[in-house]
């Protein structure tokens, strides 16, 4: 099928043991996930075109989680530039540099071995 498989690759692992056992496969799925978004973004500044929309924020958060989980997983230049554009928005730049940012939160709950 064409289009993006929006199934969140991290959600299937419900325990730290399952995550550890499936981490490699999860990261491979994550690379596919990032690649699909790279294709969808091709030639555009944001996913809807030249102007940012709510969808861009949701996609940014998903991509950011992968980058936090596996630094360097985002190899596509257009996705890197997209991430930079979102983080450069005046209000968001201030937010992301604060301790209140979602980037300071763990990726999972306190019982998880990955945060």
Image: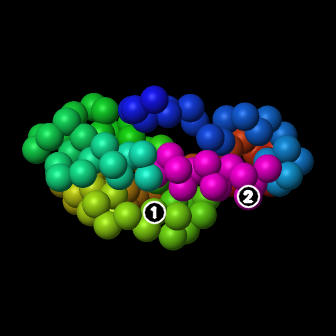
In the image, residue 6 sits, relative to residue 22, either above or below, namely: above
Residue 86 image point, x, y percent = 26, 52
- Residue pointed to by mark 2: 24
- Residue pointed to by mark 1: 74
Are there few (<14), some (14-19), or many (20+) residues within 10 Å of tag 1?
Answer: many
Residue 30 image point, x, y percent = 57, 51
Residue span colored magenta: 22-34
Q: In this view, does 25 lie to the left or right of 45?
A: right
At mark 2, the secondary structure is: helix
At mark 1, the secondary structure is: loop
Q: Please name whichever residue, 48 or 4, is drawn nearer the observer in this view of the structure.
A: 4
Identify the residue at horizontal 27%, vertical 47% (top origin): 41
From this viewpoint, which residue is outermost toward the left?
50
Identify the residue at horizontal 79%, vertical 35% (top origin): 14
Q: Please name whichever residue, 11 or 102, is drawn nearer the observer in this view of the structure.
A: 11
Q: In which quarter of the image is the C terminus?
A: bottom right
Q: In which quarter of the image is the N terminus?
A: top left
**Tag 2 or tag 1, which sits nearer the N-term?**
2
Identify the residue at horizontal 85%, vertical 52% (top origin): 21
Quadrant of the rendered image containing residue 28: bottom right
Q: Distance between the residues labelled 1 and 2?
A: 16 Å
The way the protein has been coloured in the rendering is: rainbow
Quadrant of the rendered image containing residue 69: bottom right
Identify the residue at horizontal 28%, vertical 60% (top origin): 78
Q: Is residue 55 highlighted in magenta?
A: no
């Amino acid at each position: 099928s064409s289009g993006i498989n929006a199934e969140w690759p991290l959600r299937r692992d419900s325990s730290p043991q399952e995550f550890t056992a499936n981490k490699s496969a999860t990261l491979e799925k994550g690379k596919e996930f990032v690649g699909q978004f790279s294709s969808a973004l091709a030639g555009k500044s944001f996913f809807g075109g030249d102007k940012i929309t709510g969808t861009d924020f949701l996609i940014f958060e998903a991509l950011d989680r992968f980058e936090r989980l596996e630094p360097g997983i985002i190899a596509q230049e257009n996705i890197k530039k997209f991430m930079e554009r979102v983080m450069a928005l005046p209000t968001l730049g201030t937010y992301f540099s604060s301790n209140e940012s979602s980037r300071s939160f763990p990726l999972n709950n306190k019982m998880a071995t990955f945060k």
